[in-house]
Amino acid sequence: MDGAKRVCVCDDEAAIADLVGQLLREGGFQVQVCYAAADVLASHAARPFDLIVLDVMMPGMDGFSCCRELRRQSDVPIIFLTAKDEEIDKVVGFELGADDYVVKPFKPRELMARVKARIRRAAQPEGGPALLEARGIAVDEGAFSATLHGVPLSLTPKEFAILACLVRHAGQPLASKDLFETVWREKANAQSANTVMVHVRHLRKKLAGVDSSQEFIETVWGVGYRIG
């Protein structure tokens, strides 16, 4: 385990904290499990972690307060893992400086993929090829590779470029015209929207081949496409 990245898992529900901790150990990480936010702050101050998985609803200091305190001293990647699934809670979490927000119940493979993606991004040299992540999709533009929940995706160059655009602008709808001109590097024409639609359909099939429980690429009617 020498050289393995150090991850802290904090949840006042011991069963969940221990389960996540074991999952991450099996993934090759050094893991410290805490059951109170104050212990996370003390441990991180003594020996900084490479990433922290943090519950929100905890007695005493909650996860939001803990995140706020951590951000005063560190840029360590923080992933909230919580049952609070309201949009406002996610907004607050990101505004406080969290890097990701995973809602319980979670899929172990997806959580592992998100942890690895955040650690890779934190280690990325400034100015290097982009490492992009959203909704469990990770895109490495330097290595020309993409995964969903850690499972490699076999994509054509155009499919890869479309996916990279959508992940880079996650949450923001992109017009078919803009996707076409960015990916094909030519002026959009009467057939452009249909061309993009066909490639998006193929992308959806490949994503569904890994996880068919959700729609990763949404159609925003009258606008284009979005990864939410």
Image: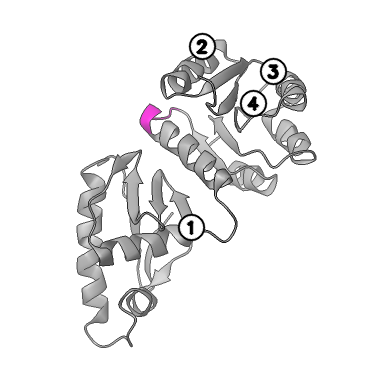
* Residue 64 visible within the image: yes
Could you give the CA–CA distance between mark 3 and mark 1, rounded to whole angstroms?
A: 35 Å
Q: x and y percent of residue 68 in the render?
A: 75, 38
Q: In this figure, which residue is indicated by the disc labeled 4?
A: 57
Label 4: which secondary element: loop
Quadrant assignment, res 218: bottom left
CA gap between label 2 and label 4 equals 15 Å
- The residues bearing labels 3 and 2 have C-alpha atoms spaced at a distance of 14 Å
Tag nearer the camera, 4 or 3: 3
Q: Which residues are magenta?
A: 105-109
Mark 1 vs mark 2: in front: 1
Residue 216 visible at all: no
Please name the residue that numbered disc 3 is placed on.
36
Q: Nearer the viewer, residue 12 or 209?
A: 209
**How has the structure been colored for display?**
one colour
Residue 130 circle label:
1
In front: 74, or 17? 74
Q: Residue at x 58, y 34 (%)?
A: 80
Whichever of labels 3 and 1 marks the residue nearer the N terminus, that label is 3
Tell me the tag on residue 15. 2
Name the mark nearer the viewer: 3 or 1: 1
Residues under labels 4 and 1: Cα distance?
Answer: 33 Å
Residues at marks 4 and 3 touching, judged by CB atoms closer than 8 Å: no
Q: Nearer the viewer, residue 123 or 205?
A: 123
Left of 90 or right of it: where is 224?
left
Residue type pointed to by label 4: Met
Q: Position of residue 37 (x, y in %)?
A: 71, 23
